[in-house]
Image: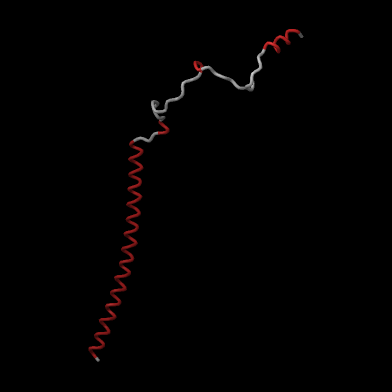
Amino acid sequence: MPGQRLIEHGRSVSPAPSDLSMKSDWSKEEPSNFRESEPSDSMTTTKEEQDHSKVELVKDNQHKLKEDLKRKIRNLQKELKELKRFLLNISRERQNVERA
């Protein structure tokens, strides 16, 4: 096939692999400039969402504080009962000593 030889002989030898495609500067797309573009809706949080998150955090903190205060009040009540028993015992002992 004489036509085939012309094609084979007509090509120049390239050092780069044949599957590599080179683009000229004018055919390349401009790179994205992320600073100029607006963020997508899915990537941004609205002021309402931020406020809602803050409200939830405040509520959670209030709940934790209430529970902590309740626990401390229960502990204080127990300590006061023990102190009352202790003082009653001292009072009884004094009365017994005075009678004797």
Q: Residue furthest top?
A: 2
Asked whether, in this view, residue 97 is left or right of residue 31, the answer is: left
Q: In the rendering, at what x and y percent does residue 63 appear?
A: 34, 53
Q: Residue at x 25, y 88 (%)?
A: 97
Q: In the rendering, at what x and y percent does residue 82 appear?
A: 31, 73
Q: Residue furthest bottom?
A: 100
Please state, as top left, top right, bottom left or bottom right, where the C terminus lies in the image.
Answer: bottom left
For the residue pair 64 and 5, the one nearer the viewer reads as 5
Q: Residue at x 57, y 19 (%)?
A: 22
Q: Residue furthest right?
A: 1
Please state, as top left, top right, bottom left or bottom right, where the N terminus lies in the image.
Answer: top right
For the residue pair 43 and 29, the one nearer the viewer reads as 29
Q: In the rendering, at what x and y percent does residue 87 appear?
A: 27, 77
Asked whether, in this view, residue 96 is left or right of residue 14, the answer is: left
Q: Is residue 100 above or below residue 18?
A: below
- Which image quadrant for residue 11? top right
Q: Is residue 27 above or below residue 49?
A: above
Q: In the rendering, at what x and y percent does residue 76 appear?
A: 31, 66
Q: Residue at x 42, y 33 (%)?
A: 43
Q: Residue furthest left?
A: 98
Q: Is residue 51 above or below residue 71?
A: above
